[in-house]
């Protein structure tokens, strides 16, 4: 264990320009989302808490939301080979496509990140349905990960 002196420990901390509340979820782009969800359910005890696919009217992507404690994983696969998710899974194999960070204000986080040099991916969006409101945006991380 190292004793690291930081600005915060010296009382020199400045206001956090990009406050993080935690990791909301990690989304994996996979060849077979249903199979991946079953593997995590049976192998690691995750619970399937949500699903989107042909049965729910989604025509492009099937997704399974799996939870265990504070961990939320999403497994997504595309129905068409020319979809971005299918192309990424084909090129890289199954892997992380999105690391979703929870922030107090998605638009402010996006603007601050892009102002500081992050490459824009998804402009701020507001989606609303009978279950609530979702505000999200995205920047490119490393490689093809958002």
Image: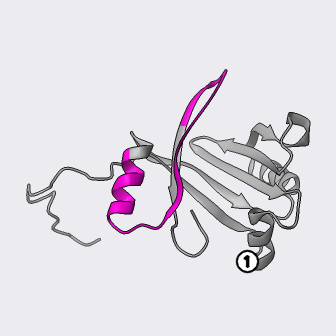
Asked if residue 72 is positioned above or below residue 84 in the image, the reply reads above
Q: Measured from the top left, where is residue 146 in percent x and y? A: 56, 62
Task: Specify start and end residues of the magenta stretch as a single range.
Answer: 108-134
CA neighbours of label 1 inside 10 A, class few (<14), some (14 to 19), many (20+)? few
Which quadrant holds the N terminus? Answer: bottom left
Q: Is residue 123 visible?
A: yes
Q: Does the magenta segment cover residue 59?
A: no
Which residue sits at x=9%, y=58%?
Answer: 12
Name of the residue lying farthest toward the bottom: 91
Q: Nearer the viewer, residue 1 or 114?
A: 114
Q: Going by the image, does 42 lie left or right of 140?
A: right
Query: Is 31 drawn above or below residue 44 in the view shown?
Result: below
Corner quadrant of residue 51: top right
Foreground residue among 17 and 114: 114
Question: Where's residue 105, x and y in %?
Answer: 40, 40
Q: Residue at x 81, y 57 (%)?
A: 77
* Residue with the mark numbered 1: 92
Residue 21 visible in the picture: no
């Amino acid at each position: 264990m190292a004793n690291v002196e930081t600005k915060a420990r010296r009382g020199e901390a400045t206001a956090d320009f990009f406050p993080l509340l935690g990791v909301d979820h990690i989304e994996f782009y996979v060849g077979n989302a249903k199979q991946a969800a079953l593997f995590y359910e049976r192998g690691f005890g995750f619970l399937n808490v949500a699903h989107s696919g042909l049965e729910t009217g989604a025509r492009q992507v099937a997704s399974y939301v799996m939870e265990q404690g504070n961990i939320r994983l999403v497994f997504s696969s595309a129905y068409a080979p020319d979809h971005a998710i299918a192309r990424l899974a084909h090129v890289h194999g199954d892997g992380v496509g999105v690391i979703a960070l929870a922030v107090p204000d998605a638009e402010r986080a996006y603007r601050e990140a892009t102002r500081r040099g992050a490459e824009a991916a998804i402009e701020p969006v507001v989606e609303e349905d009978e279950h609530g409101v979702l505000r999200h945006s995205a920047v490119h991380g490393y490689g093809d990960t958002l």
